[in-house]
Image (cartoon, grey):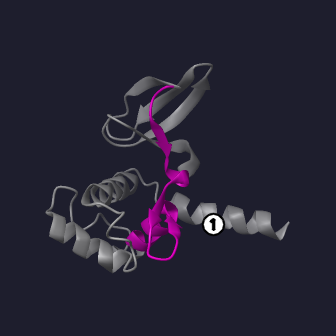
Amino acid sequence: MTLDKILSISGKPGLYKIVTQTRTGAVVESLLDGKRITVGAHSNISILSEIAIYTLTEEIPLREVLKTIKEKENGEPTKVGPKDGKLALEEFFFEVLPEYDEDRVYPSDIKKVVQWYNILQKNNLLSTLESEDEEKDTSEEE
């Protein structure tokens, strides 16, 4: 499974994977508790592969940020939690992405990234970060 199949749904906690698409939306399964729900096309859905983090010079894909966190934490859950204070979260994020734009990346965004990383780690989905790179390399060579 790639980040193309993992979603964040506004107003709902955690992350979801797409089970199947329907005419009016999709059936998704929570990565937190495994429950399936139907989301309509009107729902505010963000696909993780399309999210990027602002830096002072460019936008870095979320996949790259998650890979950096994985390397920093050796594939383990983060030492800082999403409920930690603003300073702890910002300090952690500066270690991961020193050039992130403090004016456009809010503490709430950092909380989401930390929470998403920990959910992916718990569900053994961090390996998808490397497999996506391999797929892109293969398609570029062809």
The crowd level at tag 1 (other Cα within 10 Å; few <14, some 14-19, many 20+) is few
- The amino acid type of the residue labelled 1 equals Asp
Residue receiving disc 1 = 133
Q: Quadrant of the C terminus?
A: bottom right
Residue 114 position within the rendered picture, expressed as x and y whole percent measured from the top left: 31, 60
Q: Which residues are magenta?
A: 42-70
Q: Residue furthest front?
A: 103
Query: 126 or 22: which is nearer to us?
Result: 22
Can residue 75 be seen at all in this image of the molecule?
yes
Q: Taking the image as drawn, is residue 79 in sight?
A: no
Above or below, 7 against 77 in this view is above
Residue 73 drawn at (x, y percent): 33, 73
Please report the residue visible at 44 percent of the width from the left and 76 percent of the height from the top: 56
- Most foreground residue, 6 or 101: 101
Q: Looking at this view, name the residue that lies furthest to the top.
A: 23
In percent of width and height, residue 64 lies at 50, 68
The residue positioned 49% from the left and 54% from the top of the image is 51
Residue at the image position 30 percent from the left and 39 percent from the top: 13
Residue furthest left in the image? 85
> Is residue 74 one of those drawn in magenta?
no
In the foreground, 58 or 72: 58
Q: How many marks?
A: 1
> Residue 13, relative to residue 88: is it above or below?
above
Q: Per the image, is 43 magenta?
A: yes
Q: Secondary structure at mark 1?
A: helix
Residue 136, image quadrant: bottom right
- In the image, taking residue 137 as reference, residue 106 lies left or right, namely left
